[in-house]
Image: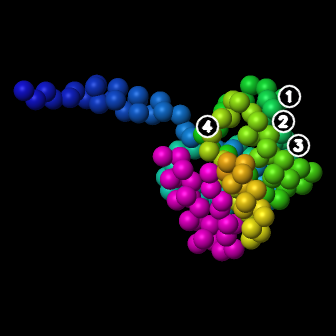
Amino acid sequence: MKRSVTVGEMRGIARRANVVPPARVLVIEDNSSDVFLLERAMKQQDLRFELIHLADGAAALAFIRRQGAYADAAIPKLILVDLHLSKYSGEDILRAIRDAQHLAGVPVCVWSSSQSQRDRAMLMDLGVARFITKPSGLDQFMEIGKIIKDLLE
């Protein structure tokens, strides 16, 4: 026997569906234009997300180590790291992430314009889930939104 769903039940279902928190994405990137384009690409995919942007390696290490202002920071669902940062290299950041027990299981992607085979080999050794080549054009940048969406699902 089929039962009809009341309007009140539908509202309750809709409220519970909205309780799912947005996907928290940590972006470690020193180029604010790239972060702007990344955010735009993710919005184009209709993703529900919260973007946490850290602009340098020192802030990233504090976040990873849960120091200072980041002592109670929530764990991201995905981490995206630029390979070439100021003060600390992307490799330094990746090693710190790998050593952080609370980040175990969080997929880490690297994006870079580097074509170095040494860089790619090092990334595989560090357990990077995906290497994304930084695009040069807007259309290619929008494709990153699809990659991020796939990684979050």
Q: Are marks 2 and 3 in contact (CB under 8 Å)?
A: yes
- Magenta stretch in the rendered image: 129-153
- Residue at 72%, 51% in the rendered image: 125
Estimate the spatial distance between the alpha carbons at disc 2 and disc 3, rounded to whole Å.
6 Å
- Tell me which secondary structure the magenta stretch mostly adopts: helix
Badge 1 or badge 4: first in the primary sequence: 1
Q: Secondary structure at mark 4?
A: loop
Instruction: Reply yes or no: does residue 26 show up in magenta.
Output: no
Q: Depth check: 14 or 29 in front?
A: 29
Estimate the spatial distance between the alpha carbons at disc 1 and disc 3, rounded to whole Å.
12 Å
Q: What residue is pinned by disc 2?
A: 62
Amino acid type assigned to the residue bearing label 4 in the image: Gly
Q: Secondary structure at mark 3?
A: helix
Amino acid type assigned to the residue bearing label 2 in the image: Ala
Locate residue 72, reporting x and y percent: 74, 25
Q: What residue is pinned by disc 4?
A: 105
Q: Residues within 10 Å of mark 3 (few under 14, many from 20)?
A: some
Vertical arrangement, residue 89 with respect to residue 142, above or below: above
Q: What residue is pinned by disc 1?
A: 68
Locate residue 19, reporting x and y percent: 47, 30
Confirm whether residue 151 shows in the render: yes
Residue 58: assigned label: 3
Vertical arrangement, residue 87 with respect to residue 139, above or below: above
Compared across the picture, whether 1 is left or right of 76 comes to left
Compared across the picture, whether 146 is left or right of 129 comes to left
Q: Secondary structure at mark 2?
A: helix
Q: Depth check: 54 or 80 in front?
A: 80
Q: Depth check: 116 or 38 in front?
A: 116
Badge 1 or badge 3: first in the primary sequence: 3
Give the tally of numbered discs: 4
Estimate the spatial distance between the alpha carbons at disc 4 and disc 2, rounded to whole Å.
19 Å
